[in-house]
Amino acid sequence: MGKINKGILGPVSGTVGTVIGGSWKGISYLRSQPTSRRTSFSQAQLEQQAKFALVIRFLQSMTALISVTFRDYAVEMSGFNNAMRYTLINAVTGVYPNFDIAYNLALVSRGDLPGAQNPLAASSAAGVITWQWQDNSGMGRALPTDKSILVAYCPSRNQCIYTVQGAARNTGTDALQVAAFSGLQVQTFIGFISDDGKLVASSIYTGQLTVE
């Protein structure tokens, strides 16, 4: 409730009826209270809002990662916004209100560097996921020194564990410590980034697995 100080001609503090009063730098002011607006959304708008919420939830778990791994395509936008656009167009499935992320169609890195060749992911040791791939150094701009990008996303916790400085391409294997996801299902991905950080490969989905 507002107050009228010093009578009807005095300054107003707070809300009185449809008027809001206050003071800024010693100057009293009055302004009308904004009218409330009830907006009814169309079916298309509701569907788009639901898709946006789903994709934002997924990508916010790896914001720092995609700011690096999507920057090659982030023309006049952030890496996050580029990843948002890509995921909305390519990796949302289902019918409203039951939308979901198609992880096999999603990317956690995007670029023109050659990706992993025949990659596999498995968890055979407690709290560890191991990736294996074939060394394809020399294919296009792929170099033996390219570093692996390993990503494990846990939908039930909406959390992501990753590295962008994994083992070199020519080693053919690397592991990620994911003890926080023990006993849980995760979605796994692998990509590569050049040793100088300037080139990125589009990620490859390496499947869903349960962490030991």
Image: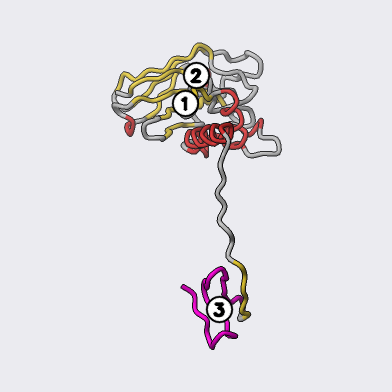
User: Which residue is at a point 44% across and 18% down the rendered structure image?
Assistant: 173
Q: What residue range appears in magenta?
A: 1-25
Three-letter amino acid code at the position of disc 1: Asp
Q: Which residue is mark 1?
A: 100
Real-space Cα separation, disc 3 to disc 2, in angstroms: 60 Å
Please tell me whether residue 38 is drawn above or below residue 59 in the rendered image.
Answer: below
Q: Which residue is mark 2?
A: 104
Which quarter of the figure has residue 21?
Answer: bottom right
Single out the residue that lies furthest toward the bottom. 6
Q: Quarter holding the C terminus? A: top left
- 95 with respect to 90 (left or right): left
Residue 73 in percent (x, y) is at 66, 30
Of pointers 3 and 1, the one earlier in the residue sequence: 3
Q: Secondary structure at mark 1?
A: strand
User: Which residue is at a point 44% across and 16% down the rendered structure image?
Assistant: 132
Q: Is residue 52 magenta?
A: no
Please tell me whether residue 122 is drawn above or below residue 76 in the rendered image.
Answer: above
Residue 83 in percent (x, y) is at 58, 32
Q: Which mark is residue 136?
A: none
- 17 with respect to 178 (left or right): right
Q: Crowding near pointer 1: few (<14 within 10 Å), some, many (20+)?
A: some
- 103 with respect to 185 (left or right): right
Of pointers 3 and 2, the one earlier in the residue sequence: 3
Q: Secondary structure at mark 3?
A: strand
Q: Which residue is mark 3?
A: 12
Three-letter amino acid code at the position of disc 2: Asn
Residue 51 in percent (x, y) is at 53, 32
Three-letter amino acid code at the position of disc 3: Val
- 183 with respect to 7 (left or right): left
Which quarter of the figure has residue 87?
Answer: top right
Report the mark closest to the observer, 3 or 2: 3
Which quarter of the figure has residue 6?
Answer: bottom right
